[in-house]
Amino acid sequence: MGYLGRNSPNNLGQILAYDTLLAAKHGTDVKYEDFVLQPALAERWETPDALTYTFHIRRGVKFANLAPVNGRELTADDIKWTYEYWSRLGQFKDKNLPVAQYGWFFEGMRSIEAPDPATVVIRFDQPFAPFINYTGSYWNPIVPHDIYDQDGNLKNRMVGTGPFQLDTAASQKGARWVFKKNSSYWNTGKPYIDEVEWVIVPDDSTAAAAFQSKQVDIIGATGTMLDFNAAKAVKAANPAAVMYPYVTFGPLLFIYINNKAAPLNDARVRQAISLATDPDEFINTFAGGEGERTLAGAFPDTYSQQEIRQLQRYDIAQAKQLLSAAGYANGLDLEFIYNPAYGQLHVSGVQLFQAQLRKAGINVTLKSMDSVAVSNARAQGKYSLTATPRTTALVGDVDSYAYANFHTGSANNQSQVSDPKLDAVLEAQRRELDQAKRKELVRQAVRTIVEQAYSIAIFRAASYQFWQPYLKGYAPNFGTLGAPQADTWLEK
């Protein structure tokens, strides 16, 4: 089957090639926004106390029959090795490795033991509420140590236990990535599809033409989102195609504000930017009025739409007053770097943001940069303003949004936020096992993020996926990025 993307598969490739300890439930009976854990490499699990997780590993699972792993059986030691590597703990502690991008998945992990080949016991120093959801994150795959043993890293080769494996010979970097059926996949008889071809098509009109000619089977999935205008055109050209409307889980435009860079280190300037942003105009322009407001650090159920309207105010007059009080009565010039590879919808959103800020006297100069340059600038804090769509890059727990992006110690805190009081609340929600109490702590953290305008999340958009009518057993879910699964099939 053919699958469209604007760049390399990245985390979608991980979903195809690797498995996780637990997994997000998917399928035609699962709503897009639902994240429900189900067994994967662990067929069952227990929490005998607030600090301990015991996982019982599925027997008979094998890695793909590719070098250097060569189809060997998965054991509990592989889970132990993987989690120690991702966390930089255990055998990897004090090895001077680069900071783990998702080390915060394992904060406070005291030990991980494999008492026998089918059992893993993980203990924490204190309760860590998000952990169980992180075992089902596509960012947290179980990997073989064999590649690391030979290469000293995991970045150049991919061999997993997942339903599909990358065929490097058939792939062409920058043009297409081919994943072939894993003949040794543990779920007998699956996957039903023999091959998934990820075709890189950066131009929206070319992508639409490829779908219409049936060169590809899905359009509008991760990395190729369709707004309501584009969806109308696709539907008109492909009346037999299955159309799946949904509201994106995360914000279509997440504005990173460099809190350490003057003048953005002044809360009044950040707040002026927030007050000059009109979410309703975004929703009407890009979602035909069929989107929702959202807040930075919040999941859709963190605050109601009525509550969000009270927190997310649009007030040009007050924005100008704050700028004047900060010493910018005559206006302010800022640079905004953006990545056009996110597509025309993203570019148009950035341009509307620029136009809105101009009304408050904030003159934004847009600078186009490639994916690597924008990513490096964010990571190094060498920017003033930038943005990404955060439609699916949220991994099953609100901690992955709030803590990861706004805690001082997080490697993902690319807005350079440093707020000890906010840190304390973000840490407290991680320790709270009572769901209601934890939600109140998250709400408190989000309120601080919004009031201080540490970053800005504008709106959740109505979006659309289309797939050919002969594609069966498929439905998008934010927990699986809308990737084809082992139980997806073709009826041609």
Image (cartoon, rainbow, N blue to C red):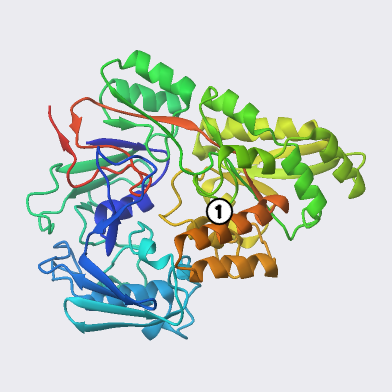
Please, what is the three-letter code of the amino acid marked with disc 1? Answer: Ser
Frontmost residue, 284 versus 233: 284
Is 202 on the left-hand or right-hand side of 211?
right
At 72% from the left and 30% from the top, the residue drawn is: 355
Q: Secondary structure at mark 1?
A: helix
Residue 105 lies, in percent from the top left, at 44, 68
Q: Quadrant of the N terminus?
A: top left
Quarter holding the C terminus?
top left
Where residue 136 appears, as percent x and y from the top left, is 33, 59
Q: Which residue is mark 1?
A: 375
Above or below 288: residue 292: below
Q: Residue at x 61, y 37 (%)?
A: 306
**At x 31% / y 45%, what residue is drawn?**
172
Residue 170 in view in this figure:
no
Quarter where residue 319 is shown:
top right
Residue 86 appears in the figure: yes
Q: Nearer the viewer, residue 435 or 20?
A: 435
| Image location of residue 103, percent across then percent down | 46, 70
Looking at the image, residue 48 lies above or below residue 157 = below
Residue 471 in picture, x, y percent from top left: 20, 31
In terms of depth relative to the viewer, which is nearer, 428 or 407? Answer: 428
Residue 92, above or below 141: below
Residue depicted at 22% across the width and 51% down the height: 167
Categorize mark 1 by other alpha carbons within 10 Å: few (<14), some (14-19), many (20+): some
